[in-house]
Image (cartoon, helix red, strand yellow):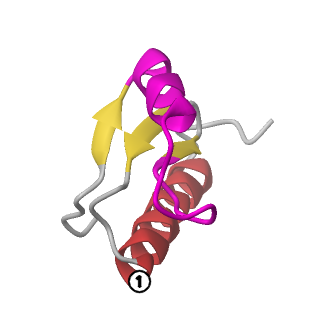
Amino acid sequence: MRYHKAISITKVEADFLIDRPTASVGECIVVQIFGEWYDVRQMTERELNAFVDDMQRSYLDDVSAGFLDPH
């Protein structure tokens, strides 16, 4: 996986960030992927898309290898 600026955070930290006002209504500040929360405020839209794609690709690779059950 490529290096990403996303910072792993807890659900409590994510809730705190979500409740704070932002400069833009559509601004993405946190992302939850497969039960893990990430602070993505420092990422551009292109970096965010690449990050999410990499996380999904990693998950599908683990499913294909039999490490995870998709259900």
Q: Split into 4 quadrants, where in the image is the N terminus?
A: bottom left
Residue ID at (50%, 43%): 21
Residue ID at (18%, 65%): 3
Residue type at the position of mark 1 = Arg
Residue at the farthest left position: 3
Q: Split into 4 quadrants, where in the image is the C terminus?
A: top right
Mark 1 nearby-residue class (10 Å; few <14, some 14–19, many ≥20): few
* 26 falls in the magenta region: yes
Residue at numbered disc 1: 46
The secondary element bearing badge 1 is classed as helix
Residue ID at (50%, 71%): 53
The region drawn magenta spans 10-30
In the rendered image, residue 46, in percent from the top left (x then y), is placed at 41, 83
Q: In the picture shown, does residue 28 fall above or below 10?
A: below
Q: In the picture shown, does residue 20 fall above or below 25?
A: above
* 16 falls in the magenta region: yes
In the rendered image, residue 29, in percent from the top left (x then y), is placed at 46, 51
Number of marks drawn? 1
